[in-house]
Image: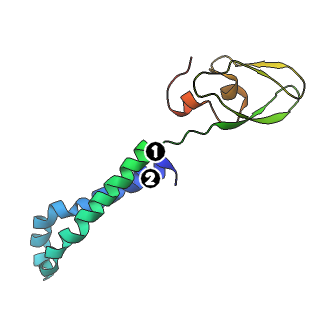
Amino acid sequence: MENRTLIKTGIVGSVISMICCFTPLLVVLLGGIGLSAWLGWLDYLLLPALVGFFSVNGIGIVATEIQLNSTITCPQCGHSETEIMPTDACQFFYDCKGCGVVLKALPGDCCVFCSYADVPCPPIQEGICCS
């Protein structure tokens, strides 16, 4: 499951589960139509659900998966090659295995993967600048 989906699921589920904090209000509102008798058991259902949804939310925030494989395509000859991106530094130059041209990062991009590949470099995926 994608991290944003996990975070959204966790937030929505947590908000729904927080209904247990409004149990006194529900007793007053639902008491008028005769449904307040079952509300005593509502906390036994909603408190574990609240813990579960907070856990899903935490997993979505913490578990950011960085993609290391990226397909870089030469703009000169169109040759594509899947490469493993370095995690400790940006790669400023890349030798095309098709035509031998040396690719450089475009102005405004931090590395050749951000310029010519389908997946940006790991620092950009993490949301930090790698310049």
Looking at the rendering, which quadrant does residue 21 occupy?
bottom left
> Residue drawn 52% across and 55% down?
1
> Residue drawn 11% across and 72% down?
27
How far apart marks 2 and 1 lie (CA) works out to 10 Å
Pointers 2 and 1 in contact (CB under 8 A)? yes
Q: Nearer the viewer, residue 99 or 13?
A: 99
Q: Under tag 2, what secondary structure?
A: helix
| Mark 1 crowd level (few <14, some 14–19, many ≥20, 10 Å Cα) | few
Residue 122 located left or right of residue 7:
right
Question: In this rendering, is residue 97 above or below 47?
Answer: above
Q: Nearer the viewer, mark 2 or mark 1?
A: 1
> Residue drawn 27% across and 60% down?
50
**Residue 104 percent across, percent down from the top left:** 74, 17
| Residue located farthest toward the bottom when viewing the structure as drawn | 34
**Residue 93 percent across, percent down from the top left:** 73, 18
What amino acid type should be assigned to the residue bearing mark 2? Leu
Residue 1 located left or right of residue 75:
left
Q: Residue 63, labelled with which disc?
A: 1
